[in-house]
Amino acid sequence: MKKKHYGMLSLAVASYLTAYAENGKQNTDKPNVILIYADDLGYGDLECYGAKNVQTPNVNRLASKGIRFTNAHATAATSTPSRYSMLTGEYAWRKPGTDVAVGNAGMIIRPEQYTIADMFKSSGYATGAFGKWHLGLGDKTGQQDWNAPLSASLGDLGFDYSYIMAATADRVPCVFIENGQVANYDPSAPIEVSYVKNFPGEPTGKDNPELLYNLKPSHGHDMSIVNGISRIGYMKGGGKALWKDENIADSITTHAIEFIKQHKDEPFFMYFATNDVHVPRFPHERFRGKNKMGLRGDAIAQFDWSVGRLLETLDEMGLTGNTLIILSSDNGPVVDDGYDDKAEELLNGHEPTGGLRGGKYSAFEGGTRVPVIVHWPQAVGKPGVSDVLISQIDWLASLASLVNARIPKGSAPDSYNRLGNLLGQDKTDRPWVIEQAANHTLSVRTKDWKFIEGGDGPEMIPWGPKIETGYLGTPQLYDMKQVGEKKNVATQYPEKVFELEKILRKVRDRSIKMK
Ligand code: NG6
Ligand code: CA
């Protein structure tokens, strides 16, 4: 299929937008685009998706004026592959080395690869990335010199500006990287990082639990200690550059606001990837104690605050109408992901997956069905809720069509233009969506069915989180017209199993195009 399958629709959108421009409103040819990408935020974690124990007024505002999707999917149930796929338009399972990355991984998307940022840049946008990266930096794993400009960074991937965390807050190095260099670098405390062995004399969570004044691990996470919290991996130094977990959201948000202000007079693309609600959950004081779910609820409130600050800034700059915001999450939720933050004990009836089976890491829906809200006052017709089947893999091609960017041949091979879905003008379901679980088990989701390929693996995640994996030796089939993946009906519908298995085989060997 050609990328222009939605040619007619694009024309319709274009004439609609021209009409707006002619009506004297802002020129909608090149709206600003902001991807707000939460970490581990579940399908049921936002008030507008049914959460009762925590308030998310700012996200509610986006949902009430935009389109809230109820059948939207991330490409993978963990961060690195999900982000890789979304940013490149290529399924991560096609490329080795795209699993959950260590903090000193070499840059996983290679400079010569085409990214969503390259796409916007080629269309004259200013491009910026903020927050969680988790796709490696520098040329080679473990070879970075963190005390000098890194040999490869986001500037090589189409981002004009970046203020990011190398990996996750639970992985060293615990410093922000601004345009490929440690931000606020402290020459008196040179940085060293290893995922192999500790540095002589440096305390660890395992040997020095008395130093864990902020959070203690519940499983894993017992290596280097930064800010009274032990992490994955070993680091030394950092001094004044080390982050304080309670200020991460403030820091990321402040830099993002600055970027908006600087680029208010030209189109900009912003990838705003929050640390919330990933572990360690240690939000700022001002978000504490206002809901009954403890730190995990506070982290959701903090996420909502960040969204609110971006919206306020757009309002102040007069940019709200002509800014397309897509809000989503990289994968499904997890409650205890390795720190003793009482998230489990304090759920108080809250269901992070909104009742879906499984969760982060899992082949079941809880792993990859995520909130998606699209907000663009000048182009989204009627606000509302959409149950159309969509996938994050299509964002690159869809947004390329929006800004008339031409995708180089062979780039973003798995991404299709579904702009009409995103803007609420086309209710046609994607014929299938491919989802990747933590152990690379793949599933095929259609409007009515879910097929999970057979393979090895334990029934429950073995290292701590209490989550069903969805792995089984034989293929599984679920009727999605019924709520939840309760009953495996593979043996009742062998022809359906065969049909979906065939789609998967053909997507794998690239012998099928989407109609
Ligand atoms: C796991 C971590 C978990 C989280 C996850 C990645 C342990 C015991 N658990 O290995 O805490 O960091 O990796 O999460 O180390 S993700 O959302 O970035 O994919
Ligand atoms: Ca994640």
Image (cartoon, rainbow, N blue to C red):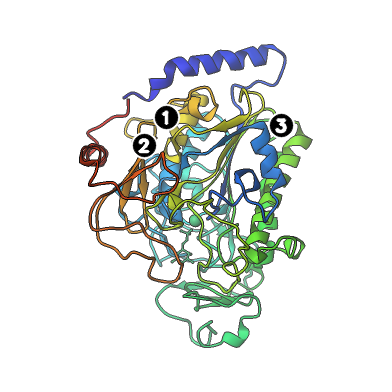
Q: Amino acid at mark 2?
A: Thr
Q: Residue at x 67, y 27 (%)?
A: 377
Q: Is residue 114 left or right of residue 148?
A: left
Q: Is residue 378 left or right of residue 353?
A: right
**Disc 3 Cβ-to-ligand 2 distance below 8 Å:** no
Q: Residue at x 47, y 30 (%)?
A: 398
22 and 511: which is toward the camera: 511
- Callout 1: SS: loop
Quarter-of-image position of residue 87: top left
355 and 307: which is toward the camera: 355
Q: Which residue is mark 1?
A: 429
* Residue 346 % position (x, y): 63, 67
Q: If the image is split into quadrants, where does the N terminus sit?
A: top left
Which of labels 1 and 3 is toward the front? 1
Quarter-of-image position of residue 147: bottom right
Q: Amino acid at mark 3?
A: Leu
Q: If the image is split into quadrants, where does the C terminus sit?
A: top left
Question: Which numbered disc, 2 or 3, marks the residue that appears first in the sequence?
Answer: 3
Q: Which mark is residue 446?
A: 2
* Residue 504 % position (x, y): 26, 41
134 and 367: which is toward the camera: 367
The image shows residue 442, relative to residue 115, as above or below, that is below
The image shows residue 267, relative to residue 354, as above or below, that is above
Q: Amino acid at mark 1?
A: Asp
Q: Which residue is mark 3?
A: 319
